[in-house]
Amino acid sequence: MLLVENVSHYCNVAIQHHPVIPLRTLRYYDFTFVVEGHMTYTVNGEEYVLGPNDAIFLPPGTLESRQEGTSPTRFVSFNFTAAAGADLNFPMVMRGLISRDMITLASVFPRPHISHRDRSLQKVTSMLNYMLYELQEICSYGTCNPYVLQALRYMEDHLDQPISLAQISQHLNLSKEYTATLFKAETGKTVMQTILEKKMQQAKDLLKYQQASIQEIASSLGFENYSYFCRTFKKYFEISPAKYRARFRKQD
């Protein structure tokens, strides 16, 4: 089911000083995320500063204003109405949850506003639906802790590479010990367990739908040791990658 019925405004801009938004009551949904720089909003009397990869999601009826920018900023913003029955229960402020894929997708359609040319409204609406589906998946992780959500998002964005606890803790600007403790407390799993689970689930999809060799798939998931990949896959699914692929194709 689609989440967005109609997009009334879209912009993807990089400017020296973003303009002020005077106090207003929203008649639509406002979804805005920062790519570079900072933006300061006041929402229902509370002030929030957004930095890179942060987003704000405001439903109709929200009392909102935005301060004038004093430094270069790049941001993407949508105003839209929801599709009938759509579940748009997002946190108002989402810290660090805008993924590399979302930013790349927005860069493909950099026009500052919707026009009547080239089906731009349909393209923007499809793009926003994709982004909101991605955020729904992130929010389904069962934690609202921004550090844990950022760690999970980092894993998703780097499944094609070797990932370590040290890399994630550096990304979060936390110590390895605190990152490990916080992640285990929030999810019940270790960082490395979660990374391997995500890589193994991705491996299943690649074995099903791609023609690449098993060794190429292992490499594409950041496994430098092919034998270790095969052992890990069999440990998780009680079947070797080769037999899993053969079984799936036989079912087809």
Image (cartoon, rainbow, N blue to C red):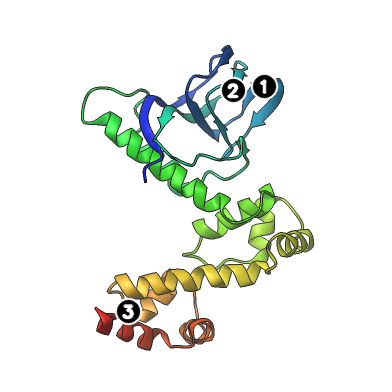
Q: Position of residue 252 (x, y in %)?
A: 24, 78
Q: Name the residue under label 3.
A: 213
Dot 2 or dot 3, earlier in sequence: 2
Residue 81 picture location, percent across and down? 42, 28
Q: Type of residue at label 1?
A: Asn
Label 1: which residue?
Answer: 44
Q: Which amino acid does label 2 sit on?
A: Thr
Does residue 192 appear to the left or right of 114 in the view shown?
Answer: right
Q: Distance between the residues labelled 2 and 3?
A: 52 Å
Would residue 43 be found to the left or right of residue 79 on screen?
Answer: right
Check if mark 2's residue and mark 1's residue have beta carbons within 8 Å.
yes
Mark 3 burial class by Cα count in 10 Å: few <14, some 14-19, many 20+: few
Q: How far separated are the C-alphas under marks 3 and 1?
A: 55 Å
Residue under pointer 2: 62
Q: Is mark 3 on a helix, strand or loop?
A: loop
Q: Return the disc, 3 or 1, that comes first in the chain's sequence.
A: 1
- Mark 2, other Cα within 10 Å: few <14 / some 14–19 / many ≥20: some
